[in-house]
Image (cartoon, rainbow, N blue to C red):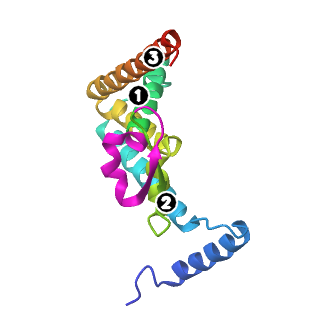
Amino acid sequence: MTSVAGSRPARRLRGLLRRTHAGYSGGHDRPLGGYTAAMAGFAVFTTAWATAVRLSGRPVPARPEPWDVALTAVATFRLSRLLSKASVTSPLRAPFTRYVGPQGPAELEEEAQPDGRHTVGELATCPFCMSVWIASALTAGQLLWPRATRTAMGTLTALAGADTLQLAYGALVGRTTGD
């Protein structure tokens, strides 16, 4: 019996990816296979929660409320920074990254491991990349568990506000003391 990985379509896809990679990469090491897997994973993730929303029978609003968009944006920003840059969450990233050094208040600079974990390492250290997944998850949460999700997003938004105030206070102290 032939496995899916060894099937003719899978072999053709691998060949296409190799040819595409050779023409695309320009001599640079670009993990297109990993990116393809990440996109497939995101498609499965989004399809799963969209299916759950449909099966729940909950109505989907005709358009998002502006307040929900703003709350989602700030919560997504804060959670993506927390997961991809914070010192305290570095154990989650460590299997896929290498420590480079500090990168601001309570944040780290890390780089993706060069081996087969590179794509996950890039995702884990990139707040912009992480934001796509987080915004999708928060959207799903708003549709499936709106009260709990809005409470969590409110907490993340308050944290973002507190961070902003801490940085502003630090800047003001630095200005007045000359540091």
Viewer-proximal residue among 123 and 146: 123
Residue underneath mark 2: 119
Q: Report the magenta residues as a range.
A: 83-105
- Tell me what residue is drawn at x 71 percent, y 66 percent: 24
Viewer-proximal residue among 106 and 20: 106
Q: Is residue 99 above or below residue 25?
A: above
Along the horizontal axis of the image, is 24 left or right of 44? right
Q: In the displayed image of the protein, which residue is found farthest to the left?
A: 148
Mark 1 closeness class: few <14, some 14–19, many ≥20 residues within 10 Å: many
Residue underneath mark 3: 67
What whole-number distance in Å separates the C-alpha atoms at marks 3 and 2? 34 Å
Can you see residue 172? yes
Which callout, 3 or 2, points to the residue nearer the camera? 2
What whole-number distance in Å separates the C-alpha atoms at marks 1 and 2? 24 Å
Q: Amino acid at mark 3?
A: Trp
Task: Give the image location of residue 174, x and y in percent.
Answer: 49, 16
What whole-number distance in Å separates the C-alpha atoms at marks 3 and 1? 12 Å
Is mark 3 in CB contact (under 8 Å) with mark 2? no
Q: Is residue 130 above or below residue 119?
A: above
- Quadrant of the image containing the N terminus: bottom left
Q: Which mark is residue 75?
A: 1
- Tell me what residue is drawn at x 50 percent, y 46 percent: 126
Asked whether 16 falls inside the magenta stretch, the response is no
| Mark before the other along the chain sequence, 1 or 2 | 1
**Disc 3 element:** helix
Viewer-proximal residue among 98 and 31: 98
